Amino acid sequence: MRKPWQREKHSNSLPEVFSSINIPKDGNFWRKLFAFAGPGLMVAVGYMDPGNWATDIAGGAQFGYTLLSVVLISNIFAMILQHLSIKLGVVAERDLAQACRDHFSPKVNFVLWFFCEIAIAACDLAEVIGSAIALNLLFGIPLIWGIVITIIDVLLILLLQSRGFRWLEAVVAVLILTILGCFAYEIILSKPEIAPILHGLLPQKEIITNPSMLYIAIGILGATVMPHNLYLHSSIVQTRNYERNESGKREAIKFATIDSTASLFIAFFINASILIVAAATFHTSGYKDVADIHDAYKMLAPILGTSLASIFFAIALLASGQNSTLTGTIAGQIVMEGFLNIRLKPWLRRLITRLIAVIPAIIITLIYGERGTTDLLVLSQVILSMQLSFAVVPLVMFTSDKLKMGKFVNKPILKISAWIISAIIIVLNLYLLIETFF
């Protein structure tokens, strides 16, 4: 049944940082944009986490530049969905988890929360493994100890957030610039041809007709559009102290959308770079079976003729893992507080999130070693794909409801586009599920 928001008194999302960053009332366009910039970068992190690397490397090595169009389409989907997430957070002043709690029955909410927690654990698993692999490649630290070291990230996050939300955003920005610089260097070294790249940005019919290409294409989509980002963005956009009236909200949506879209263009460049480097080095030299991070690291130096190629690759991977850790644990806090209205101490909440990921990673590494962690990385992306529909459908439903959104309700073209994107995501993820398990 359609109904307006029914909410508890004084239940702000992330109350410790809610409305804590001032927006200049009389500032010019650039000053205001700078004040709103930050949440977009934190969201973009989820679109370039270690889980993306395996699918992008496999896609580039096997099929050259053909799947670049899938990376581009995935990013366009992401831009639209993150815009809806911004609207929900700004207009309703609810994050997606709180909005679900306000609208659905307790039983439905519990199911949604349960699936979301599994997705966050799967995402954290990818980050733990990615960071551990990077530490192993750079410093020779055994995978098992690399996984244990990642628990320390929890303390780092707490230290940063205690100094203010802007500190977290600044660290995320520095790490993104590190990844960007590393891959700019890799592209210069690999000397890809421009014409095939431009051709690869256009969708090809064989992506649908070739089953193995379709499987990786869906993997790229699943690894790109992250369900926890929709919860995260609807919350952290509320850290800005904009005027809570119609004109203030319109301005907040405008600047937050510019921030988000520009940040996702950076994520697109990084994801596309991983695929381009794999295509320009492995595919063109006949190494089409390179399908994981370890293989890519070992092969880059001999093919490109410098050990720096492998070192920069591993540095970017470490930065990616650390960045995703920062945003993933905050998303975990938002989801638990939003769905269940349970407020744990931040260090306890983050420690629980991290241990849920660390324990299976340690067990798999002890039993199966390096190959096991790669399979676990792939499985984490499949789990994320399965959860995506449970976040996308409520988001589109809420922002398309005039009773809930008033004058800010989705316009017909945006509403239709959002439902088409939702349908594509659901159908492709069902296909991925069937192909993976049956």
Image (cartoon, rainbow, N blue to C red):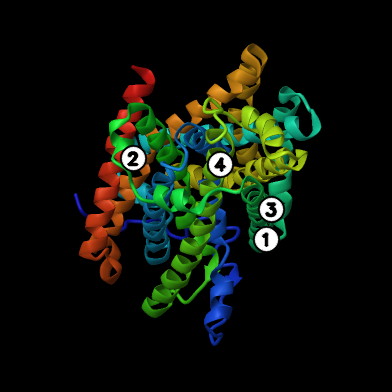
Type of the residue with mark 3: Thr
Callout 1: helix, strand or loop? helix
Q: Earlier in the sequence, mark 3 or mark 2?
A: 3
Q: Which residue is mark 3?
A: 178
Q: Is residue 258 visible?
A: yes
- Horizontal side of 198 relative to 150 (left or right) equals left
**Which sits in the foreground, 3 or 408?**
408
**Which sits in the foreground, 327 or 376?**
376
Q: Residues within 10 Å of mark 1 (few under 14, many from 20)?
A: some
- Asked if 259 appears above or below 64 in the picture, the reply is below
Type of the residue with mark 1: Ala
**Which sits in the foreground, 384 or 76?**
76
Type of the residue with mark 4: Ala
Q: Which residue is mark 1?
A: 170
x, y percentage for residue 152? 74, 38
Callout 3: helix, strand or loop? helix
Type of the residue with mark 2: Ser
Q: Give the numbered dot on residue 280.
A: 4
Q: Which residue is mark 2?
A: 389
Q: Is residue 341 visible?
A: no
Residue beneath the point at 30% across and 52% down: 396
